[in-house]
Image (spheres, rainbow, N blue to C red):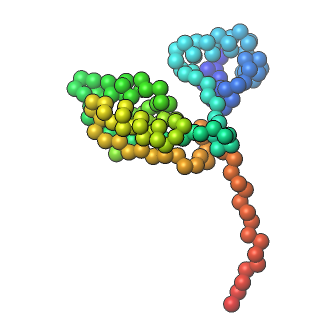
Amino acid sequence: MDAMKLLQMLSEDPRATVTDLADILGEQEEQVAAEIDSLEKNKIICGYHTVINWDKTNIDHVDAYIGVSAKPERGKGYDKIAERIARFPEVSSLYLTSGTSEFLVSINAKTMREVADFVGEKLAPIDGVTATVTMFVLKKYKVNGVTMEMEAEIEDDRLPVSA
């Protein structure tokens, strides 16, 4: 079975049925189901996610990215700090990055105040954290490869004016 093709298909449509995947791959359903199970157990497939356009709901929702500067610990590097940050339920994603900050933390909250409280009360006091920079998402245009609904461009039907 072509595991790479299976992974590509699931990344494009996580709701694809085993029956549909088996048909496209030319494999037996049992083989596809067993391969998916193996990929999940080996943490190659780590989850299935839904992209939600929160702007179209009546639910308060704020997304923020926080650049975190940190000093690595001897013998542990940045891993110990990352483990502390990752434990917080507010953290949806955490990355070690290059550039001006060592970490990029993504969090979801109901209000900007909740984000500020998280940064000030939980994130910034962690040993090894030396600075934070919080960026609030103001508008989403594309998320995980999915284009959010955008207004169509209005064509300018005015006639050109010449002098």
Q: Residue at x 52, y 18 (%)?
A: 43
Going 46% across and 39% down the picture, which residue do you hit? 115
- In the figure, is residue 111 to the left or right of 96? right
**In the foreground, 110 or 2:** 110
Q: Which residue reaches farthest bottom?
A: 163
Quadrant location, the C terminus = bottom right
Residue 33 occupies which quadrant of the picture? top right
Camera sees residue 147: no
Foreground pick, 20 / 75: 75
Residue at image position (71%, 60%) is: 153
Q: Residue at x 59, y 39 (%)?
A: 60
Q: Say left or right for 80 vs 107.
A: left
Residue 136 percent coordinates (x, y): 49, 46
When the figure is inspected, residue 13 is found, relative to residue 34, above or below; the finding is: below
| Residue 144, above or below 24 | below
Residue 70 pos. (x, y %): 30, 36
Q: Is residue 163 visible?
A: yes
- Considering the image in quadrants, where does the N terminus appear? top right
Horizontal side of residue 17 vs 78, given as left or right? right
The one of 162 and 29 positioned closer to us in this rendering: 162
Choose top left, top right, bottom left or bottom right for residue 76.
Answer: top left
